[in-house]
Amino acid sequence: MPQDDFEHRKGVLIFSIAVVLITAVGIGAGAGYCITSSNLSSAWFFLVLAALTPLTAYLLYKKTIFPYYRRLEDANLELHLKQEELLDTKDDLFIKFLGIYDVNYAANSPRMFSNRLKDVADITARVMEADACFIYLYDKRGQNLVLSATNGILESAIGKARVPLGEGVEGWVARRLEPIILKDYHADARYKPVPGLSLDDFQSVYCLPLFVYSNGDLVGIMEVLSRKARLFADEEINFFTTLSGIMSTTIENEQLQGELRRMNVELEQWVAEKTEELRASEERYRTLVENSTQSIFVLAENGDIIFANERAVRLTGYAKYDLLHKNLFELFADPGIPKEILNEAKDGQSALRYGELRRTDGATVPVEVTVVELFLMGKRFIQTVVRDISALSQLEKRLAEKEREISELRARLNSK
């Protein structure tokens, strides 16, 4: 009833009641006056009117007050029904909210992924009051949907039942990325039996795609089935849609983590192989260097000694530990010689110099110094080979003495 009409009827009712009351009071006053003035004929008239007043009030009640209260009762009953409906809706929404919480907790729990999917299927079937819930994951390589979890129904088909992309109701939903609600599942033209999965007992289906909104990548589908024909309320549709968003993100994260774990395993294997190769290479290098007949040093760019072989230890007289804490400049009588060859090595050139190396006992040894760049593990070093040329120097001195003696003999012969 419109509000203006209701207010008008209410005003008429109040006015009518007021008129009846005023009339009753007037009749009573007139009857009393006639009786006190001994006017019996007029008193009888007022008494007849007084008798008609209850009849008038009854008629007024039946025509106005009773319908008014009747409408009030109907309105109260309708209001009560609406309140009950709102309470039912509130309870249903609360159940759906708890369902969303349970699904989010189950999907992100520390359990194995297959167990988490089963928990989600159980919760979804319970909240949606469905007989079955199936979760399919998308296999990009095979271009098909693989049954990966159920709510305990037909568990033997998990991992075996496959739906090619674009085929059947499930394949159509995955291809089009559109949800579908079918009251009669088998009567739809898109229906196609799933090999290894018997769905003859189910009649209605609600199927949703699972895909990531940010990039549109399909990760699977999810469906609930009912043995009886049914439609789904707005609260159920909103719940299932929200659930699909949670599951899409969860499945994508799991797939990314699986890919990351696989890449980590491959990376660890690669690092292990390269480390073994480097160790073997380093071992070969050390063997060659340690067994070399020449003194070999490996230097940092500033000349600090970071490696020296046994031959270098014997040449310098230092212990290996002490030698690794020195700079090449400290070993030469003339520090300018190693500085020159290091500068040439920095320019990418090989260098050769002669000088005198000072031993720990103070003696000097004539040496030949050769340097070359060396790169290890992406870093630049300088390899220095120091060769003791004492024997050569002695030989050169003896040769010089012989040549001097020969020159003196020739001079004497010529003088004679």
Image (tube, grey):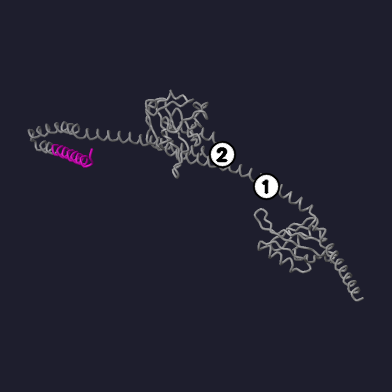
Q: What x and y, as percent, mark residue 148?
A: 51, 32
Tell me if mark 1 has few (under 14), some (14-19) or many (20+) residues whose alpha carbon lies within 10 angstroms of its own: few
Q: Amino acid at mark 1?
A: Thr
| Residue 130 % position (x, y) | 43, 29
> Label 2 belongs to which residue?
110
Q: Nearer the viewer, residue 291 or 319?
A: 291
The x and y percentages for residue 71 are: 24, 34
Which of the two residues, 257 or 394, is positioned nearer the viewer here? 394
According to the image, label 1 marks what residue? 275
**Residue 219 sits above or below residue 337 on the image:** above
Q: Residue at x 91, y 73 (%)?
A: 413
The quadrant of the rendering that contains the N terminus is top left
Which residue occupies the foreground of this view, 113 or 387?
A: 387
Tell me which numbered mark, 2 or 1, is placed earlier along the sequence.
2
Return the residue found at the far top. 200
Instruction: Answer left or right for 110 relative to 290.
Output: left
Residue 262: which disc?
none
Residue 324 is left or right of residue 6, and the answer is right
Please state the extent of the stretch shown in magenta in the rendering: 1-28
Q: Secondary structure at mark 1?
A: helix
Q: Of residues 210 and 399, which is closer to you in this image?
A: 399
| Left or right placement of residue 45 versus residue 197 in this view | left
Q: At label 2, which amino acid type do we have? A: Pro
Tell which tag, 2 or 1, sits nearer the viewer.
1
